[in-house]
Image (cartoon, helix red, strand yellow):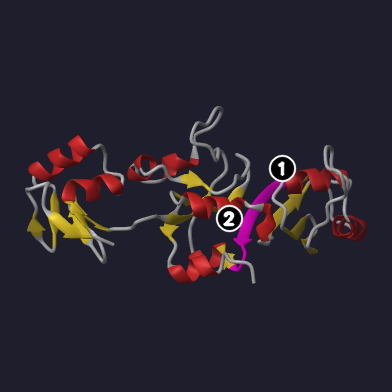
Amino acid sequence: MAKISLDRVLQSQGFGSRKYCRELIADGEVSIGGVTMDDYRTSVETQGLVFSIFDEEWEYREHVYLALNKPPGYECSRKPSHHPGVLTLLPEQFTWRDVQPVGRLDHDTTGLLLLSDDGAFIHAQSSPKRHVPKLYLATTAEPVTDELIARLLDGVQLHDEPAPIAAKTCRQVGERQIEIVLEQGKYHQVKRMLAAAGNHCAALQRTSIGRLTLSQLNLDEGEWCFLDAEQLAQLMPE
């Protein structure tokens, strides 16, 4: 990382336009190491940079990698049509940074959702060639049967799919609940598979991606966190 002017630092971190960031600096809203910065042309080293804006501390990040425990009733879209977008659950600067959901969860599906402004990361995580397992907890409309589990493991035929699609693993965890692991990530896949197998999905939660689990992040619904290098590594295929 190189030295860049302070206004460019703020702009890159999503605090607004270059002009607005200069105004923030001129108004004394930005400090580094407890020292108020008043010249937007000041060059700063971005490596390890921590700055305060509006008395809130922020660490400089070239890219951001986020995990969100998505609540129901939110769309995974930058331009939602029928429900609020998940970006409304995040600080406003992430919208300025062009943070986007990695893949999608239906508006009524809850659980682990990744977001980032790193295009290469988004593309890699969304690629069907990666075969990253995703674990879902599905609540069914009708009681779970051994036949249902068998059909999901053997593969069910979905409309517009050339061949049957099978769960990587599937097990019953309650009278009307299953844990199902998928790798493909197709549109409404769990719901469509359950319907094709003779049941219906009443509720759905994604609980893990790769080896990264929602429980280890300890996020309540609607809460988010930055992912560190160790957590990002858990998203890689084994």
Q: Quadrant of the C terminus?
A: bottom right
- The residue at the point 68 percent across, 49 percent down is 204
Q: Is residue 114 visible?
A: no
Residue at the extreme front:
2
Please state which of the two labelled residues, at mark 2 or mark 1, is closer to the viewer: 2
SS assignment at label 1: loop
Measuring 24% from the left and 60% from the top, which residue is drawn there?
2
Residues in magenta, as a range:
202-211
Mark with earlier residue (2, 1): 2
Which residue is more in the foreground, 176 or 112? Answer: 112
- Left or right of 121? Residue 28 is left
Q: With 192 as the anchor, is 70 left or right in this view? A: left
Q: Residue at x 6, y 48 (%)?
A: 38
Identify the amino acid type marked 2. Gln
The tag on residue 188 is 1
Q: Give the class, few, some or many, for how many residues have Cα within 10 Å of label 2's Cα (few <14, many ≥20).
A: some
